[in-house]
């Protein structure tokens, strides 16, 4: 068991060590070329300013989108990797309506190379609405508070999330030299931007090269040999009893 623990620690150490940031933007000095915003625009963050953790907060401008619009991020010439990770701050703005029939049916969806990697509804308007997204630890930054745009009050409260802290967007299996992410709120609840919208800030993508199975096997074999040697030593010292 000790050797297995050591091996898993070794593996996680390698994953952490090999993270390479391949794209990063705070949206404050324009729109980076790999982003195709559709109808989304750079907009001041209003009351979202400062939400987040030290070094990773909303500020300046973010990319604000109407529901129904698709924002695309296309990264090319990626270094050799086995996994890809997505980090960003997500602003759920105004009266998003969660799961249900119109005006509900507001699902934030992220795809990677055409496959869904995230799809959950978000609800801001009424406490009785159903939000399918249940934030893991350290993800929720604000919920049902007035952070600007429509409102204040009424149906137009807002929420904020650090989706970079959601493990489901970390170390997604990926090996291709091109990665295409899309971001959108879709579903039957799509309404105009003065009623509901969303935004992203502090967007970054990193890739990691985990050890090849052969390398991990060699390390594991070495640890097992060490464990076996120590076991033999322990047995031999016990034998006189
Ligand atoms: Ca910003
Ligand atoms: Ca608002
Ligand atoms: Ca809606």
Image (tube, rainbow, N blue to C red):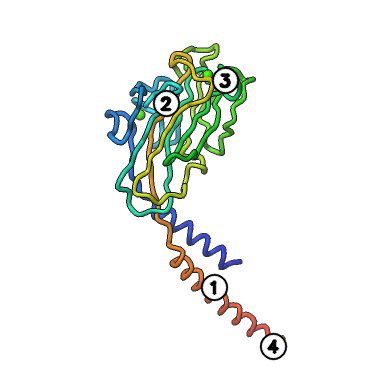
- Looking at the image, is 19 positioned above or below residue 7? above
Farthest-out residue, front: 114
User: What percent of the width, then of the height, locates residue 58?
Assistant: 40, 29
Give the mark nearer the N terminus: 1 vs 4.
1
Q: Label 3 crowding class (10 Å Cα cut-off): few <14, some 14-19, many 20+?
A: many
Looking at the image, in which quadrant does ligand 1 appear? top left
Mark nearer the viewer, 2 or 4:
2
**Residue carrying label 3:** 104
| Cα separation between marks 2 and 1 | 50 Å
**Residue carrying label 2:** 199
User: What percent of the width, then of the height, locates residue 153?
Assistant: 53, 12
Mark nearer the viewer, 3 or 4:
3
**Residue carrying label 1:** 224
- The residue positioned 33% from the left and 35% from the top of the image is 25
Q: Secondary structure at mark 4?
A: loop
**Residue carrying label 4:** 240
Residue 195 lies left or right of residue 177; in this view the side is right
Give the mark nearer the N terminus: 1 vs 3.
3
Kindly indicate the quadrant of the structure image that contains residue 69.
Answer: top left
Q: Secondary structure at mark 1?
A: helix
């Amino acid at each position: 068991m000790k050797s297995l623990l050591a091996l898993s620690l070794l593996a996680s150490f390698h994953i952490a060590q090999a993270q390479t940031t391949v794209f990063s933007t705070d949206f404050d000095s324009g729109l980076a070329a790999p982003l195709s915003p559709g109808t989304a625009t750079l907009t001041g963050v209003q009351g979202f300013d400062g939400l987040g953790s030290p070094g990773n907060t909303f500020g300046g401008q973010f990319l604000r989108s109407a529901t129904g619009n698709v924002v695309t991020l296309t990264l090319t010439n990626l270094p050799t990797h086995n996994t890809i990770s997505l980090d960003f701050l997500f602003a759920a703005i105004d009266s998003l309506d969660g799961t249900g029939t119109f005006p509900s049916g507001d699902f934030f969806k992220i795809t990677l190379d055409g496959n869904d990697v995230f799809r959950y509804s978000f609800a801001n308007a009424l406490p009785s609405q159903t939000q399918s997204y249940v934030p893991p630890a350290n993800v929720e930054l604000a919920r049902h508070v007035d952070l600007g745009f429509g409102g204040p009050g009424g149906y137009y409260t807002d929420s904020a999330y650090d989706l970079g802290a959601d493990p489901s967007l970390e170390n997604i299996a990926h090996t291709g030299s091109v990665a295409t992410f899309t971001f959108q709120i879709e579903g039957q609840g799509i309404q105009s931007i003065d009623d509901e919208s969303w935004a992203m800030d502090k967007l970054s993508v990193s890739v990691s090269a985990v050890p090849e199975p052969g390398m991990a096997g060699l390390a594991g074999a070495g640890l097992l040999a060490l464990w076996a040697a120590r076991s033999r030593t322990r047995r031999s010292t016990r034998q006189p009893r």
